[in-house]
Amino acid sequence: MMVMKATMDDVRVRNFLNTKVPKIPEAANKGTFKHAKRIAKSIKTQLISETYKASRAKMGARIYAKKINKNSTGIMMPQKAIWLDSMKPHYVALKRGRLITRWAKKFYDYGGTIRKGFSRVRTGPKGGIRKGSKLFVTPHPFVDKGMSKVRNQAGITVLREINKLITS
């Protein structure tokens, strides 16, 4: 049989706790900010990844994590990105001068009426889009997809920062 005796120096433990415990919220905030950056990167990847849609690289470059104040972190993105994520499906008339009309010309560049889903894009014999054409647009829910990929890592990231503090 083996007996082991453990003693603890009360002063050293108190000093350790007095120096480390007040810094735990700061470490947790640091971990939260790191996780917010990871979420922003994932959302950006989801926004840009779908190649059959109109290019969204410029919009993706404006998605980032930001410290709002000492205790809160947010993910900033353009209002257009939020609208794209949460809009209701609707028709858009293809009129001259609109960016969506230029995009439709690029993908519907041959004669006749193209029916894909609810869209009715009519092009003329010379490749122009004719009057009365409409495109059915639907939302692109990239925010939920991006967040679901990294949601489980939130606690791990925060705990990792707290452990770094304690072991240092």
Image (cartoon, rainbow, N blue to C red):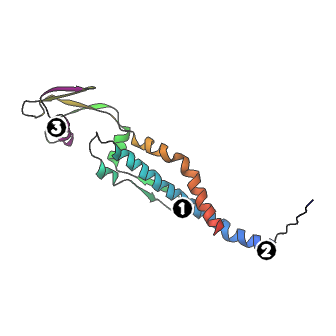
Question: In the picture provided, is 30 more to the left or to the right than 21?
Answer: left
What is the secondary structure assignment of the residue under circle 1? helix
Residue appearing at x 15%, y 35% in the figure:
109
Identify which residue, 20 or 167, lies in the foreground.
Answer: 167
Residue 30 in percent (x, y) is at: 54, 61
- Residue position for label 2: 11
Q: Nearer the viewer, residue 56 or 92?
A: 56
Which residue position holds label 1?
Answer: 30
- Tag count: 3
> Which residues fall within the magenta stretch?
98-115
Instruction: Compute the Cα span from label 1 to label 2.
Output: 29 Å
Q: CA distance from mark 3 to mark 2?
A: 76 Å
Q: Residue at x 29, y 31 (%)?
A: 90
Residue 93, quarter of picture: top left
Q: Which residue is mark 3?
A: 105
Q: Is residue 73 magenta?
A: no
Q: Earlier in the sequence, mark 3 or mark 2?
A: 2
Q: Amino acid at mark 1?
A: Lys
Query: CA separation, marks 1 and 3?
Result: 47 Å
The amino acid type, in three-letter code, at marker 2 is: Val
- Image spot of residue 137 (x, y percent): 29, 33
